[in-house]
Amino acid sequence: MNQILEYLTVFVLSAFVGVEVISKVPSILHTPLMSGSNAIHGVIVVGSMLVLGYATTTPEIVLGTIAVFLGTLNVVGGFVVTDRMLEMFKARPDDKKPTGKDAAP
Amino acid sequence: MSRGTFLDLCYLVAAITFIVALMGLSSPRHARRGNLVAVGGMTIAIGATYAQPHLRHLGWMVGAMVLGAAIAVPTSRFVKMTAIPQLVAIFNGVGGGAAAAVSITEYLALTRTYVLCPRTTAVGIGCFTFGGVKDVATYKILEVVLGVVIGTVSFSGSAIAFSKLQELMTGRPVTYPAQQLLNAILGVAVVTVAVLLLVTGSLVWLWILLVLALVLGVAFVLPIGGADVPVLISLLNAFTGIAVAASGFTIGSNLLIVAGTLVGASGILLTRMMSSAMGRSLPNILFSAFGSVVTASTSTERDDGRSVRTGSPEDVGVLLAYARKVVIIPGYGLAVAQAQHVVRELVDELHKRGVEAFFAIHPVAGRMPGHMNVLLAEANVPYDELKEMDEANAELSTADVALVVGANDTVNPAAKSAPGSPTYGMPIINADEAANIVFLKRSMRPGFAGIDNDLLYDPKTVLLFGDAKDTLTKLVAAVKAA
């Protein structure tokens, strides 16, 4: 029972951190943030690897392999999609050297 | 330091990067870096897992990962930008499926062995020596139930959301007779089977629970449609986070608990932010197709139930700062508020950031022809930044934002579409063609012509109520801060 209390502590503290870190997000970032956190819960791939790695019976191996496959889709797809979305926030080249029109008074 | 301690430290580092990543993703300046930080953390976590002692079935593991990556990378890289929401939906769904599969697999392992293996540490020997079925502690089964139910609902719900967005099925809410009653019965059934599983620990109930959860996910998502689907995906994303945390409890992984809970908590908050940005409450979005919740606001809602979306100057400031092309459409409200100097400041600020910004002047903007030109000239706006209606209309279809400052009738599409309208036939500035429309208005009162403006209720329209000068001042500050 001590073990579960330790996990509950981690759980409760993480919940507070989760609420705290994104207290104010501009609405154009809502979708990238959703996509980014989608990739982060792709960490389930680590859990999938552990259950597959310590599996012994056939059903466990089959389910474990499916879990690793699904988890990989989640984590890889999640990160690539988020990066694509965020490409539009790259600093524009004009930021450094304004072109003719932008330099006008 | 033992190998187990080192690997646990790696997991701790990964957990920290996820927190840093979420912080980064909340600000436009650091968003991309935040995502890359999370990629780094995830790489460390996966690497550390491969280094765990006594890991078996590496062939299956590597094979499944290579196949997954081989499908995910091209899909996410080459799909059109417009299809991004359904990609997020499907990648979220498979995450929920993975969490459910992990919980089930671990339950199979738990009911098979006498010795519990702490999977995240180096104790690998002696875990698999005993056969037969053993009673599992009730709280352990509860963790499995939560992981399976929430993960599976997220899986099947995301699949339906994907089908709606991909137009494999209708995007509208799907309703059928006694929907609410059937869903309630389904919910009760899930709880009953979960209790039976908790009491008996029998695998049969686990499989029944899995099927019921699949159906529940579908039934939950079917009545939600249209513009509400992105909010729904955000909620399902939070669900998957919670399912991952539950799996973390089951297999005893602090990393999964931290990452899953982070996503679950921030995801629920984000879902609330998204729904309030649409001027709706979350229950209204989730259950409105049942007719059980009615939007409370009256002033911003019309008889036919459509409501307007209000925003904050901070949101709009960021929208403007990261746009490529902004068209400002001034009207009488700008003149009344004497806001020409502030609006000039806003344009200058946008130019500094490399945003293309100019004014679109309707011939009858204000109360007399040329009113706007005079006002803006007074604020030293260069002549080439004032575009006449036809010139501006040619640009609007490629504009990211149409910022309507105190104008109304001159952008009212009724002039084109409603033969009965007093302004029918009047040429207008096609603000409706821009990707986003922002109205700065004093109130919901109609314009000079006294007719309602459909554009205000357009899903891509955001309203900022208040005095144009005040709002513009806030916008300038928000653009500077972005």
Image: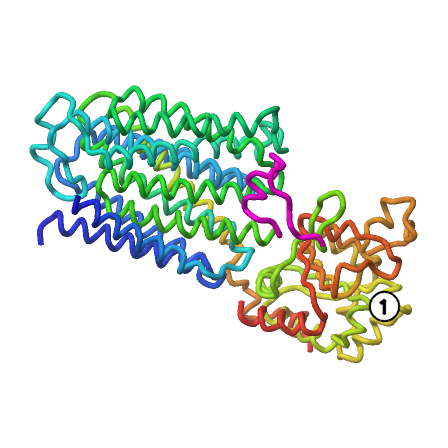
Residue B90: x percent and y percent? 47, 35
Residue visible at 29% across and 38% down in the picture:
B247
Left or right: B96 in relation to B158: left
In the picture shown, does residue B285 fall above or below A101? above
Q: Which of B355 and B96 is in front in this view?
A: B96
Q: How many labels does the image show?
A: 1
Q: Which colour scheme is used?
A: rainbow
The answer to which image quadrant residue B353 occupies is bottom right
Residue B395: x percent and y percent? 74, 56
Residue B446: x percent and y percent? 82, 58
Left or right: B230 in relation to B302: left
Helix or strand or loop: what does disc 1 sit on? loop
In the picture shown, does residue B264 fall above or below B373? above
Q: Residues within 10 Å of mark 1 (few under 14, many from 20)?
A: many
| Residue occupied by mark 1 | B366
Indicate the chain on which mark 1 is placed.
B
Q: Which of B335 and B72 is in front in this view?
A: B335
Residue visible at 66% across and 56% down in the picture:
B462
Residue type, numbered disc 1: Gly
- The magenta stretch spans residue B273: no
The answer to which image quadrant residue B244 occupies is top left
Instruction: Please state, as top left, top right, bottom left or bottom right, where the N terminus of chain B lies in the image.
Output: bottom left
Left or right: B39 in relation to B129: right
Residue B441: x percent and y percent? 74, 64
- In this picture, which residue range is highlighted in magenta? B279-298
In the picture shown, does residue B24 fall above or below B169? below
